[in-house]
Amino acid sequence: MPPRHSPGVLRLATSLFATLTAAQHDYSQYVNPFIGSEGPFEGLAFGGGDIFVGGALPFGVAKVGIDTYEDNVTYSVINGGYTPNGHVTGISMMHESGTGGAPKYGLVPQMPLTTVDEPVNILDNRTYWQDRVGNDTTRVGYYATQLENGVGVELSASRHAGIMQYQFPAGEKHVLVDASHYLPSEGGGNAVQAYVGGSIQLEPNGKTYTGHTSVGGGWNEGAPITVFFCGEFEEAPDQAKTFSGRLTDPIQRYHTWSNGPVPEPQFSQNGSSEVSGPLNDRVGALFTWSNSSAATVKSRVGISFISSEKACAFKNDEIPSWNLNDTVTKAVEEWNRDVFSKIQVPTGDAQNRTNLVLLYSSLYFMHLMPSDRTGENPLWQSGEPSWDDFYTLWDIFRCTVSLYHLIQPSYYQGMVRSLIDIWRWEGFMPDGRSGNYNGLVQGGSNADNVLADAYVKGLPGINWTAAYQAMLKDAEVQPYNTFSFTDFTASVKEGRGALYDWVPLGYVSSDRSTRPISRTVEYALNDFALAQVARGEAPDDVEKYMNRSANWQNIWSHNITHKNFTGFLAPRLSNGMFNLTDYNPALCGDCEWSSISYEGVPFEYSFTIPHDMETLIDFMGGPDEFERRLDYIHMPNTSEQNLGANGAAISTIMNIGNEPDFATPYEYNYINKQYKSVEHARALANQYFHDANYGVPGNSDAGALNSWLIWQMLGLYPVVTQPVYLIQSPWFEDINMTINGNATLRIMANGLDNQESYYVQSVKVNGENWDKNWLEHTDIMVNGGTIEFELGSEMTRWENGDVPPSPGHVEKQQIS
Ligand SMILES: *[C@@H]1O[C@H](CO)[C@@H](O)[C@H](O)[C@H]1NC(C)=O
Ligand SMILES: *[C@@H]1O[C@H](CO)[C@@H](O)[C@H](O)[C@H]1NC(C)=O
Ligand SMILES: *[C@@H]1O[C@H](CO)[C@@H](O)[C@H](O)[C@H]1NC(C)=O
Ligand SMILES: *[C@@H]1O[C@H](CO)[C@@H](O)[C@H](O)[C@H]1NC(C)=O
Ligand SMILES: *[C@@H]1O[C@H](CO)[C@@H](O)[C@H](O)[C@H]1NC(C)=O
Ligand SMILES: *[C@@H]1O[C@H](CO)[C@@H](O)[C@H](O)[C@H]1NC(C)=O
Ligand SMILES: *[C@@H]1O[C@H](CO)[C@@H](O)[C@H](O)[C@H]1NC(C)=O
Ligand SMILES: *[C@@H]1O[C@H](CO)[C@@H](O)[C@H](O)[C@H]1NC(C)=O
Ligand SMILES: *[C@@H]1O[C@H](CO)[C@@H](O)[C@H](O)[C@H]1NC(C)=O
Ligand SMILES: *[C@@H]1O[C@H](CO)[C@@H](O)[C@H](O)[C@H]1NC(C)=O
Ligand SMILES: *[C@@H]1O[C@H](CO)[C@@H](O)[C@H](O)[C@H]1NC(C)=O
Ligand SMILES: *[C@@H]1O[C@H](CO)[C@@H](O)[C@H](O)[C@H]1NC(C)=O
């Protein structure tokens, strides 16, 4: 029977509420950790959020959950490990959340089995994988499922460790630990993960095992990462044996038993230790409890990137109790204290529960990644914080990091310092980074945008001299071409692969480079980011980078007309000529690595100039034409490009499932027609975000989509690289946000009715009437403050002050 998924009925609720004081409201009860677990086809993750489901802490290293395998490769996506109906191949300690492309992680597993007799071969998961029966249960810090072999699985997680509890039926009880396990890329290809060695030892106490696994590859094409582990069972098994078997995975540049048959395990002669050796043998251990033992097997597992000793210490320190509920309770407390309570809204009976679920679930998903690996950097010692799983900045630079800045200032400071430290020790900041390895770069070097955004808002504790040096490296040094199969033309590991075009030509050309249109607009914003930081750190550079930030104008073709709109970004050759042969700005080929634009068509990218909206509006023919064009992209059936699974059946050019368009519905603010921003952005939120398994329009992208929804519900939207927020309309009548450490921003909405009364009639900021549809960071985000909305059902042009700024405004000599 295919399991269905509902947020767990609160089995724990009574005990949790008892331990919470009134001041610590249990916001975790509103979190539905399944939002994004399915796509448009019920029972399939395909086209959904690719989310992780399991036990985790905010930005935790351990994300403990099931790994699955789906038979139908066409429709399989197992990036977060979890799929609604896939066969369970293990319960592992490390996962990503929300990522597309080939999977990464699924490392350090256990698998409870009730038999290991033929046809089971413990080196072949197809012989022992398990379907699930009944419904999975999950809530913050807790996951439970029932395997078809009768084993009930419950789990929870701390920061670097997990606790698993297996309820066995009568009969045999085994736990398999296959150190060579990882999430496969079911379709194969260049970006598969590859196991390249491991070890396992049984400790003399009979209960504990330690070891390591090294696995490379995955979407970001990373070097092997070594994860040390330390597992312990509450009760010593009656028998424990280590085993090894030959590696048959086809891997470039590593030794394997090519085209060998499925290997048979060789059990160790002395039974206590295996090392994979020069042929990268698979290694593992099998633990067995005899029939007479208790039916419950409990286990705690710690992980570390430094040593198995540290993994053991994490296990012991973070999970001192064998009562799984103690770890759940601690997780819930931490999520409430450090995450959910940062945004407090009324929770009484009169409230619409769906909106509470959307708010607190979105907060949950935007805190699963990146991972805080401070103290766990195996590559260098610097004393700086260490973060990983920026997957990717391309996704989260637009509005996720600016929310971290407000509600997680100390975590965020750690992230930014870590980005700079990566530059110091490895030469480039990442755009994507996972498994302690930079990659992949989809567009520009967007760490530049993150740094500039933090700089203009005064994030403390950053060495801005170093930050600017790191940004200069991106702007001036062509990264080595590592000849990725993803794109042979230039590096996609880090930096800006098309600098060879950008610097001499002033644009990314369509004949020498891939993704010329999307990379041109992204590089332009990156250079604006340099200009922003240069204002304080290197004033002599400001003019240079301001000029470069206007380079998007170099690929604006003023005389192409499409659907009665004139002027678009267009492909330009290295000889200076536009190539308008068969050019349609509403098409991108397949919007992939070698297309003219990435994950969006040029029509969409033609709206992504946040630093100089003034010129953009001018190029589009003035405010009226700009408005007409914005209206058009929100109209159904305007999309001409089939985006496949990425499209979430969206038929408008405006695609809220994809990050480049995040700011677009808010751009009516730039012509002082804020009510139209509210109209369209609310409609998008209502249409595509739901308290349901198919509740986000496509991959959640490390919480990027979720953070877009939070801003929408707050009634604000940040303009990246500027200390500016566009005013929208909030979804709650009263919001208290804890910002900048311990300041309070209070957002109040009189006259709100989310069904019919949500258009702004007037706004007061800190008690004063406000005639602009935007705010500056210092107005309310430093010391806190209040925003009071008067809402109504009438679309009103309430604002008559200055439009939001265009600090990157540059008038270039126009080309045609
Ligand atoms: C956790 O607590 C709940 C209720 O308090 C109980 O039903 C459940 O069995 C407990 N689980 C474990 C693993 O102790
Ligand atoms: C995969 O699923 C699709 C849709 O249900 C179906 O058309 C196709 O035949 C399946 N392929 C395999 C190999 O089962
Ligand atoms: C699973 O959940 C569905 C809907 O949420 C419900 O109808 C069904 O009864 C549940 N099944 C079991 C076995 O609990
Ligand atoms: C499980 O088995 C499949 C099929 O042989 C294989 O591709 C995969 O790598 C194995 N491991 C996992 C974790 O799925
Ligand atoms: C088992 O063998 C490994 C290497 O083969 C060795 O390091 C270890 O000391 C041995 N253990 C025992 C208990 O003999
Ligand atoms: C926000 O804070 C104010 C002042 O402390 C308080 O009166 C109000 O009830 C709070 N609102 C919410 C939703 O917590
Ligand atoms: C609650 O909000 C959701 C979406 O925001 C909406 O669909 C639903 O109709 C609302 N329910 C009530 C009772 O207002
Ligand atoms: C800041 O970074 C610069 C440039 O890398 C370095 O020279 C300086 O020592 C750093 N300052 C501090 C306080 O670490
Ligand atoms: C111009 O674009 C067309 C259509 O995409 C393409 O076939 C052609 O190769 C391009 N010309 C050059 C010189 O790149
Ligand atoms: C655009 O203008 C340029 C120069 O003014 C001209 O060469 C080109 O043919 C025009 N393209 C179109 C599509 O009209
Ligand atoms: C084309 O756009 C102009 C405004 O630029 C408008 O006046 C005209 O009606 C439009 N034509 C069509 C066919 O939509
Ligand atoms: C909280 O505020 C007090 C005084 O306003 C200040 O001294 C303290 O540093 C602040 N704490 C944090 C975490 O920002």
Image (cartoon, rainbow, N blue to C red):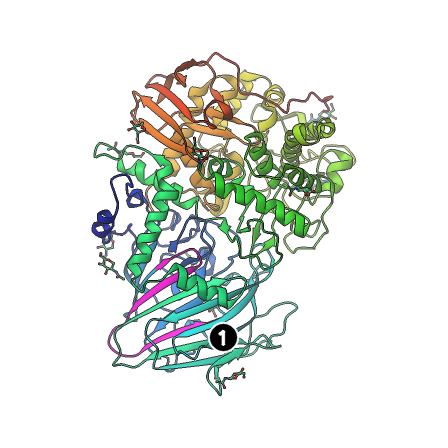
Q: Residue at x 31, y 36 (%)?
A: 355
Residue 779 is situated, as x and y percent measured from the top left of the image, at 48, 22
Residue 651 at what x, y percent from top left? 45, 36
Picture quadrant of residue 535:
top right
Q: Going 66% across and 41% down the picture, which residue do you hit?
A: 466
Q: Is residue 456 magenta?
A: no
Query: Is the residue marked by circle 1 packed among few (<14), some (14-19), or many (20+) residues within 10 Å?
Result: many
Disc count in the image?
1
Q: Where are the magenta residues, as a range? A: 156-179
Q: Quadrant of the C terminus?
A: top right
Residue 464 vs residue 413: left or right? right
- Secondary structure character of the magenta stretch overall: strand
Of residues 56 and 306, the one drawn nearer to the viewer in this rendering: 306
Question: Taking the image as drawn, is residue 164 in sight?
Answer: yes
Q: Which residue is mark 1?
A: 200
Q: Quadrant of the N terminus?
A: bottom left
Q: Is residue 668 above or below residue 448?
A: above
Residue 746 position within the rendered picture, expressed as x and y whole percent measured from the top left: 37, 26
Residue found 47% across the figure and 19% down from its top: 773
**Considering the numbered disc 1 on the image, is that residue within a helix, a strand or a loop?**
strand
Depth order, front residue of 486/581: 486
Q: Is residue 707 left or right of residue 611?
A: left
Q: Establish if 757 lies above or below 524.
A: above
Q: Is residue 622 left or right of residue 693?
A: right
Amino acid marked by disc 1: Ile
178 falls in the magenta region = yes
Q: Is mark 1 within 8 Å of ligand 5?
A: no
Against 474, residue 162 (above or below) is: below
Viewer-side residue, 40 vs 217: 217
